[in-house]
Image (spheres, rainbow, N blue to C red):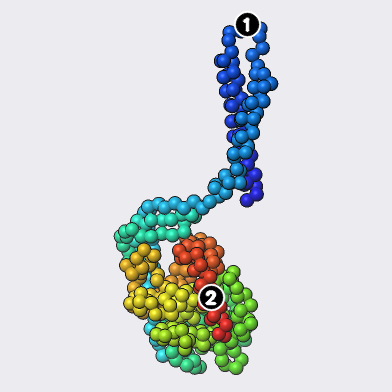
Amino acid sequence: MKKRKNIIIVIISIIIAIALALAIIFAINKNNNKKTVQSETENTYPTEEILKEIRQSVAETPLKDYNLETIINNNEKEKITEKIEKKEADIEFTTQYRDNSSLAKGKIQTIQEGQDGKQNEIVRSTYKNGVLVATQPISVEVKKVAKDKIVEVGTGAYSANYVPIAGDKLKPIENEIDLKTDANQESNTIKKLAKTDTVVIKEAKNDWYNVKIDNQTGWVPKSKMEYVNEAENADGGMPVYTKEQLTQNFGISMLLNRRSGLTLEQFKQILENDPNDKQNVFKNIYQYFYYVEQQYNVNGLFVAAIAVHESGWGTSALSLRTKNLFGYGAYDRDPSAYANQFGAYESGIDLVSRVLVKYYLNPKGTPIYNGEIAQGTYFHGATVTGVNTSYASDKRWGEKVYKWMTYFYNKL
Protein backbone atom coordinates (compact mmCIF):
# COMPACT_ATOMS: atom_id res chain seq x y z
CA MET A 1 0.00 0.00 0.00
CA LYS A 2 2.84 2.41 0.92
CA LYS A 3 4.62 1.65 -2.35
CA ARG A 4 1.42 2.35 -4.28
CA LYS A 5 1.03 5.75 -2.57
CA ASN A 6 4.63 6.68 -3.38
CA ILE A 7 4.04 5.90 -7.06
CA ILE A 8 0.91 8.06 -7.11
CA ILE A 9 2.79 10.96 -5.42
CA VAL A 10 5.59 10.77 -8.01
CA ILE A 11 3.06 10.83 -10.88
CA ILE A 12 1.22 13.83 -9.42
CA SER A 13 4.53 15.67 -8.82
CA ILE A 14 5.49 15.17 -12.48
CA ILE A 15 2.11 16.55 -13.58
CA ILE A 16 2.59 19.62 -11.35
CA ALA A 17 6.12 20.19 -12.73
CA ILE A 18 4.80 20.09 -16.31
CA ALA A 19 2.06 22.55 -15.35
CA LEU A 20 4.66 24.91 -13.88
CA ALA A 21 6.78 24.74 -17.02
CA LEU A 22 3.79 25.50 -19.26
CA ALA A 23 2.79 28.40 -17.00
CA ILE A 24 6.27 29.92 -17.19
CA ILE A 25 6.32 29.63 -21.00
CA PHE A 26 2.87 31.21 -21.19
CA ALA A 27 3.94 34.09 -18.94
CA ILE A 28 7.07 34.71 -21.02
CA ASN A 29 5.10 34.82 -24.28
CA LYS A 30 2.53 37.12 -22.75
CA ASN A 31 5.23 39.51 -21.52
CA ASN A 32 6.95 39.58 -24.92
CA ASN A 33 3.70 40.35 -26.72
CA LYS A 34 3.16 43.42 -24.54
CA LYS A 35 6.51 44.94 -25.42
CA THR A 36 6.92 47.45 -28.21
CA VAL A 37 9.15 46.70 -31.16
CA GLN A 38 12.71 46.53 -29.92
CA SER A 39 16.03 46.15 -31.58
CA GLU A 40 17.16 42.62 -32.46
CA THR A 41 20.06 42.90 -30.00
CA GLU A 42 17.84 43.81 -27.02
CA ASN A 43 17.51 41.19 -24.22
CA THR A 44 13.93 39.69 -24.27
CA TYR A 45 14.21 37.47 -21.13
CA PRO A 46 11.70 38.22 -18.31
CA THR A 47 12.82 40.54 -15.59
CA GLU A 48 13.37 39.46 -11.98
CA GLU A 49 10.10 41.15 -11.06
CA ILE A 50 8.14 39.07 -13.59
CA LEU A 51 9.81 35.85 -12.45
CA LYS A 52 8.84 36.70 -8.87
CA GLU A 53 5.20 37.11 -9.91
CA ILE A 54 5.29 33.77 -11.75
CA ARG A 55 6.74 32.00 -8.75
CA GLN A 56 4.10 33.47 -6.46
CA SER A 57 1.07 32.96 -8.70
CA VAL A 58 1.99 29.64 -10.31
CA ALA A 59 4.62 27.81 -8.30
CA GLU A 60 3.15 28.29 -4.83
CA THR A 61 -0.59 28.04 -5.45
CA PRO A 62 -0.78 24.53 -7.03
CA LEU A 63 1.25 22.98 -4.21
CA LYS A 64 -1.17 24.48 -1.70
CA ASP A 65 -4.31 23.54 -3.62
CA TYR A 66 -3.36 19.91 -4.44
CA ASN A 67 -4.10 17.63 -1.49
CA LEU A 68 -2.17 14.46 -2.34
CA GLU A 69 -3.76 12.41 0.47
CA THR A 70 -7.24 13.28 -0.80
CA ILE A 71 -6.33 12.26 -4.35
CA ILE A 72 -4.86 8.95 -3.13
CA ASN A 73 -7.86 8.15 -0.92
CA ASN A 74 -10.28 8.91 -3.77
CA ASN A 75 -8.36 6.52 -6.01
CA GLU A 76 -8.59 3.79 -3.36
CA LYS A 77 -12.36 3.93 -2.86
CA GLU A 78 -14.25 0.71 -3.69
CA LYS A 79 -15.30 0.57 -7.32
CA ILE A 80 -18.58 -1.31 -7.72
CA THR A 81 -19.70 -2.18 -11.24
CA GLU A 82 -22.57 -4.23 -12.64
CA LYS A 83 -22.61 -6.23 -15.87
CA ILE A 84 -25.27 -8.18 -17.72
CA GLU A 85 -23.68 -11.51 -18.65
CA LYS A 86 -24.68 -14.75 -20.35
CA LYS A 87 -23.19 -17.98 -19.02
CA GLU A 88 -23.72 -21.71 -18.62
CA ALA A 89 -24.31 -22.81 -15.02
CA ASP A 90 -24.85 -26.02 -13.09
CA ILE A 91 -28.28 -26.93 -11.75
CA GLU A 92 -27.42 -28.49 -8.40
CA PHE A 93 -29.03 -31.89 -7.92
CA THR A 94 -31.32 -32.61 -4.96
CA THR A 95 -30.68 -35.40 -2.46
CA GLN A 96 -33.41 -37.70 -1.15
CA TYR A 97 -32.76 -39.42 2.19
CA ARG A 98 -34.45 -42.72 3.05
CA ASP A 99 -34.34 -44.70 6.30
CA ASN A 100 -32.93 -48.24 6.19
CA SER A 101 -33.28 -50.37 9.33
CA SER A 102 -30.80 -52.95 8.02
CA LEU A 103 -28.03 -50.34 8.19
CA ALA A 104 -26.43 -49.47 11.50
CA LYS A 105 -27.42 -46.10 12.96
CA GLY A 106 -25.01 -43.40 11.88
CA LYS A 107 -24.11 -45.15 8.62
CA ILE A 108 -25.26 -43.99 5.20
CA GLN A 109 -24.99 -45.53 1.76
CA THR A 110 -25.59 -43.93 -1.62
CA ILE A 111 -28.06 -45.88 -3.75
CA GLN A 112 -27.99 -43.45 -6.68
CA GLU A 113 -25.39 -40.78 -7.35
CA GLY A 114 -26.72 -37.35 -8.19
CA GLN A 115 -25.88 -35.53 -11.40
CA ASP A 116 -25.98 -31.77 -11.89
CA GLY A 117 -28.09 -30.38 -14.69
CA LYS A 118 -27.11 -27.52 -17.01
CA GLN A 119 -28.77 -24.23 -17.84
CA ASN A 120 -28.00 -21.09 -19.80
CA GLU A 121 -28.40 -17.97 -17.68
CA ILE A 122 -28.57 -14.25 -18.26
CA VAL A 123 -27.47 -12.70 -14.98
CA ARG A 124 -26.70 -9.34 -13.45
CA SER A 125 -23.19 -9.70 -12.02
CA THR A 126 -21.87 -7.32 -9.37
CA TYR A 127 -18.12 -6.71 -9.13
CA LYS A 128 -16.30 -4.93 -6.31
CA ASN A 129 -12.84 -3.74 -7.34
CA GLY A 130 -12.92 -6.24 -10.19
CA VAL A 131 -13.90 -9.21 -7.99
CA LEU A 132 -17.26 -10.96 -8.54
CA VAL A 133 -19.29 -10.70 -5.31
CA ALA A 134 -22.87 -11.44 -6.40
CA THR A 135 -25.03 -12.64 -9.28
CA GLN A 136 -28.75 -12.27 -9.78
CA PRO A 137 -30.58 -14.23 -12.51
CA ILE A 138 -32.60 -12.37 -15.09
CA SER A 139 -33.62 -15.36 -17.20
CA VAL A 140 -32.72 -19.06 -17.44
CA GLU A 141 -33.03 -21.78 -20.07
CA VAL A 142 -32.68 -25.36 -18.81
CA LYS A 143 -30.52 -27.51 -21.12
CA LYS A 144 -30.19 -30.66 -18.97
CA VAL A 145 -32.33 -31.68 -15.99
CA ALA A 146 -30.52 -32.64 -12.77
CA LYS A 147 -30.66 -36.24 -11.52
CA ASP A 148 -31.51 -36.76 -7.84
CA LYS A 149 -29.09 -38.40 -5.43
CA ILE A 150 -30.62 -41.13 -3.24
CA VAL A 151 -29.06 -41.89 0.14
CA GLU A 152 -30.13 -44.55 2.63
CA VAL A 153 -29.72 -43.68 6.30
CA GLY A 154 -29.10 -46.43 8.83
CA THR A 155 -31.57 -46.63 11.70
CA GLY A 156 -30.67 -50.09 13.06
CA ALA A 157 -28.22 -51.15 15.73
CA TYR A 158 -24.77 -52.33 14.63
CA SER A 159 -24.30 -56.10 14.79
CA ALA A 160 -21.74 -58.69 13.79
CA ASN A 161 -24.06 -59.59 10.91
CA TYR A 162 -23.51 -56.23 9.23
CA VAL A 163 -22.77 -56.64 5.50
CA PRO A 164 -19.99 -54.29 4.34
CA ILE A 165 -20.70 -52.02 1.39
CA ALA A 166 -18.63 -49.98 -1.11
CA GLY A 167 -16.46 -47.49 0.74
CA ASP A 168 -16.19 -49.59 3.90
CA LYS A 169 -12.81 -50.78 5.14
CA LEU A 170 -11.69 -54.39 5.59
CA LYS A 171 -8.68 -56.20 6.98
CA PRO A 172 -7.47 -59.83 6.59
CA ILE A 173 -8.37 -62.32 9.31
CA GLU A 174 -5.26 -64.37 8.52
CA ASN A 175 -1.61 -63.40 8.82
CA GLU A 176 -1.25 -63.29 5.05
CA ILE A 177 -3.61 -63.52 2.06
CA ASP A 178 -3.25 -62.97 -1.69
CA LEU A 179 -4.56 -59.91 -3.54
CA LYS A 180 -5.69 -61.42 -6.88
CA THR A 181 -6.05 -59.92 -10.37
CA ASP A 182 -9.50 -61.53 -10.81
CA ALA A 183 -12.27 -62.98 -8.65
CA ASN A 184 -10.90 -66.54 -8.62
CA GLN A 185 -8.10 -68.43 -6.88
CA GLU A 186 -6.36 -69.37 -10.15
CA SER A 187 -5.72 -65.74 -11.15
CA ASN A 188 -2.35 -64.09 -10.65
CA THR A 189 -1.30 -62.69 -7.28
CA ILE A 190 -0.66 -58.94 -7.25
CA LYS A 191 0.77 -58.83 -3.73
CA LYS A 192 0.50 -60.34 -0.27
CA LEU A 193 -1.74 -58.61 2.27
CA ALA A 194 -0.68 -58.69 5.91
CA LYS A 195 -3.12 -58.90 8.81
CA THR A 196 -2.28 -55.28 9.65
CA ASP A 197 -3.22 -54.00 6.16
CA THR A 198 -6.48 -52.13 5.60
CA VAL A 199 -8.25 -52.09 2.23
CA VAL A 200 -11.27 -50.17 0.91
CA ILE A 201 -14.14 -51.95 -0.85
CA LYS A 202 -14.85 -50.81 -4.41
CA GLU A 203 -17.48 -53.45 -5.25
CA ALA A 204 -18.69 -56.95 -4.35
CA LYS A 205 -19.03 -59.88 -6.74
CA ASN A 206 -20.34 -63.25 -5.55
CA ASP A 207 -17.89 -64.41 -2.86
CA TRP A 208 -15.27 -61.76 -3.61
CA TYR A 209 -14.56 -58.12 -2.86
CA ASN A 210 -12.83 -55.82 -5.30
CA VAL A 211 -10.64 -53.68 -3.04
CA LYS A 212 -8.05 -50.92 -3.20
CA ILE A 213 -4.90 -50.51 -1.14
CA ASP A 214 -2.56 -47.60 -1.84
CA ASN A 215 -2.56 -47.34 -5.67
CA GLN A 216 -3.30 -51.02 -6.33
CA THR A 217 -6.66 -52.68 -6.97
CA GLY A 218 -7.45 -56.39 -6.82
CA TRP A 219 -9.75 -59.13 -5.50
CA VAL A 220 -9.91 -60.86 -2.10
CA PRO A 221 -12.21 -63.65 -0.81
CA LYS A 222 -15.01 -62.41 1.47
CA SER A 223 -14.39 -65.34 3.80
CA LYS A 224 -10.89 -64.10 4.59
CA MET A 225 -11.76 -60.48 5.37
CA GLU A 226 -13.47 -58.72 8.26
CA TYR A 227 -15.16 -55.34 8.54
CA VAL A 228 -13.24 -52.49 10.18
CA ASN A 229 -15.80 -50.59 12.26
CA GLU A 230 -14.17 -47.16 12.62
CA ALA A 231 -17.11 -45.95 14.68
CA GLU A 232 -16.14 -48.23 17.56
CA ASN A 233 -13.52 -47.79 20.24
CA ALA A 234 -12.21 -50.37 22.67
CA ASP A 235 -15.41 -50.16 24.73
CA GLY A 236 -17.61 -50.75 21.69
CA GLY A 237 -19.05 -47.23 21.69
CA MET A 238 -18.67 -44.12 19.55
CA PRO A 239 -15.39 -42.23 20.05
CA VAL A 240 -16.20 -38.95 21.79
CA TYR A 241 -13.78 -36.03 21.71
CA THR A 242 -13.85 -33.70 24.69
CA LYS A 243 -15.08 -30.13 24.41
CA GLU A 244 -11.47 -28.96 24.76
CA GLN A 245 -10.39 -31.14 21.84
CA LEU A 246 -13.29 -30.07 19.63
CA THR A 247 -12.81 -26.36 20.32
CA GLN A 248 -9.00 -26.14 20.28
CA ASN A 249 -9.10 -24.44 16.85
CA PHE A 250 -12.42 -22.67 17.36
CA GLY A 251 -12.49 -18.98 16.49
CA ILE A 252 -13.66 -16.47 13.88
CA SER A 253 -10.79 -17.57 11.61
CA MET A 254 -11.36 -21.34 11.96
CA LEU A 255 -11.38 -23.27 8.68
CA LEU A 256 -14.82 -24.58 7.74
CA ASN A 257 -13.92 -26.83 4.80
CA ARG A 258 -13.42 -29.79 7.14
CA ARG A 259 -15.47 -31.85 9.57
CA SER A 260 -16.21 -30.62 13.08
CA GLY A 261 -15.31 -34.00 14.58
CA LEU A 262 -18.62 -34.27 16.44
CA THR A 263 -20.40 -37.60 16.68
CA LEU A 264 -24.02 -38.12 15.69
CA GLU A 265 -24.93 -38.14 19.39
CA GLN A 266 -23.17 -34.81 19.93
CA PHE A 267 -25.17 -33.21 17.12
CA LYS A 268 -28.27 -34.57 18.85
CA GLN A 269 -27.12 -33.16 22.20
CA ILE A 270 -26.66 -29.71 20.67
CA LEU A 271 -29.75 -29.43 18.47
CA GLU A 272 -32.39 -31.57 20.18
CA ASN A 273 -34.70 -29.92 22.72
CA ASP A 274 -33.22 -26.45 22.39
CA PRO A 275 -35.57 -23.82 23.90
CA ASN A 276 -35.18 -21.66 20.77
CA ASP A 277 -36.57 -24.47 18.60
CA LYS A 278 -40.23 -23.50 19.04
CA GLN A 279 -41.42 -25.54 16.04
CA ASN A 280 -39.25 -28.61 16.83
CA VAL A 281 -37.73 -28.29 13.37
CA PHE A 282 -34.11 -28.88 14.36
CA LYS A 283 -35.04 -31.57 16.87
CA ASN A 284 -36.15 -33.73 13.95
CA ILE A 285 -33.34 -32.99 11.49
CA TYR A 286 -30.17 -32.74 13.63
CA GLN A 287 -28.73 -35.91 12.06
CA TYR A 288 -28.51 -34.40 8.57
CA PHE A 289 -25.93 -31.85 9.67
CA TYR A 290 -23.80 -34.84 10.69
CA TYR A 291 -24.42 -36.64 7.38
CA VAL A 292 -23.35 -33.67 5.23
CA GLU A 293 -20.10 -33.54 7.22
CA GLN A 294 -19.39 -37.16 6.36
CA GLN A 295 -20.17 -36.76 2.67
CA TYR A 296 -18.83 -33.31 1.79
CA ASN A 297 -16.15 -32.34 4.33
CA VAL A 298 -17.84 -29.24 5.67
CA ASN A 299 -18.32 -28.19 9.29
CA GLY A 300 -21.88 -29.30 10.08
CA LEU A 301 -22.29 -26.82 12.93
CA PHE A 302 -21.46 -24.00 10.52
CA VAL A 303 -24.24 -25.22 8.22
CA ALA A 304 -26.62 -25.49 11.19
CA ALA A 305 -25.70 -21.97 12.34
CA ILE A 306 -26.58 -20.58 8.90
CA ALA A 307 -29.92 -22.41 8.98
CA VAL A 308 -30.75 -21.11 12.46
CA HIS A 309 -29.79 -17.53 11.58
CA GLU A 310 -31.57 -17.37 8.22
CA SER A 311 -34.79 -19.09 9.32
CA GLY A 312 -35.09 -17.88 12.92
CA TRP A 313 -34.88 -21.47 14.16
CA GLY A 314 -37.29 -22.60 11.46
CA THR A 315 -40.01 -20.11 12.38
CA SER A 316 -39.85 -17.75 9.38
CA ALA A 317 -42.81 -17.86 7.02
CA LEU A 318 -40.47 -18.50 4.09
CA SER A 319 -38.82 -21.53 5.70
CA LEU A 320 -42.12 -23.03 6.82
CA ARG A 321 -43.62 -22.67 3.35
CA THR A 322 -40.62 -23.80 1.29
CA LYS A 323 -38.72 -26.15 3.69
CA ASN A 324 -35.80 -23.85 2.84
CA LEU A 325 -33.99 -23.00 6.08
CA PHE A 326 -31.32 -20.96 4.31
CA GLY A 327 -33.30 -18.63 2.09
CA TYR A 328 -31.22 -20.24 -0.66
CA GLY A 329 -31.93 -18.61 -4.01
CA ALA A 330 -33.70 -15.66 -2.36
CA TYR A 331 -32.75 -12.05 -3.10
CA ASP A 332 -33.23 -8.99 -0.93
CA ARG A 333 -35.59 -7.33 -3.40
CA ASP A 334 -38.14 -10.21 -3.39
CA PRO A 335 -37.17 -13.24 -1.24
CA SER A 336 -40.45 -15.13 -1.67
CA ALA A 337 -40.36 -15.01 -5.47
CA TYR A 338 -36.88 -16.46 -5.87
CA ALA A 339 -36.22 -18.81 -2.91
CA ASN A 340 -35.83 -22.51 -3.74
CA GLN A 341 -38.57 -24.84 -2.53
CA PHE A 342 -37.67 -28.31 -1.17
CA GLY A 343 -39.73 -31.39 -0.45
CA ALA A 344 -37.96 -31.88 2.88
CA TYR A 345 -35.66 -29.85 5.13
CA GLU A 346 -32.80 -32.33 4.68
CA SER A 347 -32.75 -31.78 0.91
CA GLY A 348 -32.01 -28.10 1.47
CA ILE A 349 -29.34 -28.90 4.08
CA ASP A 350 -27.63 -31.24 1.62
CA LEU A 351 -27.79 -28.85 -1.35
CA VAL A 352 -26.56 -25.77 0.52
CA SER A 353 -23.68 -27.79 2.01
CA ARG A 354 -22.58 -28.79 -1.49
CA VAL A 355 -22.91 -25.23 -2.76
CA LEU A 356 -20.75 -23.94 0.08
CA VAL A 357 -18.07 -26.56 -0.60
CA LYS A 358 -18.16 -26.13 -4.37
CA TYR A 359 -18.31 -22.33 -4.68
CA TYR A 360 -17.39 -20.66 -1.37
CA LEU A 361 -15.11 -22.76 0.85
CA ASN A 362 -12.49 -24.08 -1.55
CA PRO A 363 -10.30 -22.44 -4.20
CA LYS A 364 -10.86 -23.32 -7.84
CA GLY A 365 -9.45 -26.72 -8.79
CA THR A 366 -9.64 -28.30 -5.32
CA PRO A 367 -10.83 -31.95 -5.41
CA ILE A 368 -14.01 -32.13 -3.34
CA TYR A 369 -16.71 -34.86 -3.27
CA ASN A 370 -17.52 -37.66 -5.74
CA GLY A 371 -14.65 -36.74 -8.07
CA GLU A 372 -15.99 -33.18 -8.37
CA ILE A 373 -13.66 -30.19 -8.57
CA ALA A 374 -14.39 -26.95 -6.70
CA GLN A 375 -15.27 -24.00 -8.93
CA GLY A 376 -14.29 -21.48 -6.25
CA THR A 377 -16.42 -18.75 -7.88
CA TYR A 378 -16.93 -16.93 -4.58
CA PHE A 379 -13.90 -18.16 -2.64
CA HIS A 380 -12.46 -15.49 -0.33
CA GLY A 381 -11.10 -17.83 2.32
CA ALA A 382 -12.55 -20.88 4.10
CA THR A 383 -13.74 -18.83 7.09
CA VAL A 384 -17.08 -17.38 8.11
CA THR A 385 -15.91 -13.86 7.17
CA GLY A 386 -14.62 -15.16 3.83
CA VAL A 387 -18.02 -16.68 3.03
CA ASN A 388 -19.73 -13.43 4.12
CA THR A 389 -18.00 -11.51 1.29
CA SER A 390 -20.24 -12.92 -1.44
CA TYR A 391 -22.86 -15.06 0.33
CA ALA A 392 -24.80 -12.28 2.06
CA SER A 393 -25.39 -8.56 1.47
CA ASP A 394 -25.39 -7.97 5.24
CA LYS A 395 -21.77 -7.17 6.16
CA ARG A 396 -22.39 -8.45 9.70
CA TRP A 397 -23.83 -11.77 8.50
CA GLY A 398 -20.63 -13.66 9.35
CA GLU A 399 -20.57 -12.19 12.84
CA LYS A 400 -24.18 -13.29 13.44
CA VAL A 401 -23.58 -16.83 12.16
CA TYR A 402 -20.44 -17.11 14.27
CA LYS A 403 -22.50 -16.14 17.34
CA TRP A 404 -24.67 -19.23 16.82
CA MET A 405 -21.63 -21.43 16.26
CA THR A 406 -20.28 -20.24 19.61
CA TYR A 407 -23.65 -21.00 21.20
CA PHE A 408 -23.57 -24.55 19.79
CA TYR A 409 -20.01 -25.34 20.85
CA ASN A 410 -20.75 -24.07 24.36
CA LYS A 411 -23.50 -26.70 24.67
CA LEU A 412 -21.00 -29.56 24.47
Measuring 31% from the left and 62% from the top, which residue is drawn there?
Answer: 142
Measuring 55% from the left and 50% from the top, which residue is drawn there?
Answer: 76
Q: Amino acid at mark 2?
A: Lys
Q: Amino acid at mark 1?
A: Ser
Task: State whether residue 363 appears in this view.
Answer: no
Measuring 56% from the left and 89% from the top, which residue is drawn there?
Answer: 238
Horizontal and vertical percent position of residue 179: 55, 78
> What is the quadrant of residue 225 in the picture?
bottom right
Residue, far right: 48
> What is the quadrant of residue 97 in the picture?
bottom left
Residue 379 vs 352, above or below: the answer is above
Residue 66 vs 300, above or below: the answer is above
Q: Is residue 45 left or right of residue 317?
A: right
Q: Is residue 248 left or right of residue 134?
A: right
Q: Going from the N terminus, do you reach mark 2 or mark 1 first?
A: 1
Q: Nearer the viewer, mark 2 or mark 1?
A: 1
- Residue 273, which numbered label? none
Of residues 377 and 202, the one nearer the viewer is 377
Measuring 35% from the left and 79% from the top, which residue is drawn there?
Answer: 320
Horizontal and vertical percent position of residue 244: 64, 82
Does dot 1 land on a helix, a strand or a loop?
Answer: loop
Horizontal and vertical percent position of residue 230: 56, 85
Residue 237 vs 81, above or below: the answer is below
Residue tagged 1: 39
Neighbourhood count class around disc 2 (C-alpha, 10 Å): few under 14, some 14–19, many 20 upward: some
Horizontal and vertical percent position of residue 400: 51, 72
Of residues 332 and 56, the one nearer the viewer is 56
Of residues 412 and 5, the one nearer the viewer is 5
Residue tagged 2: 403
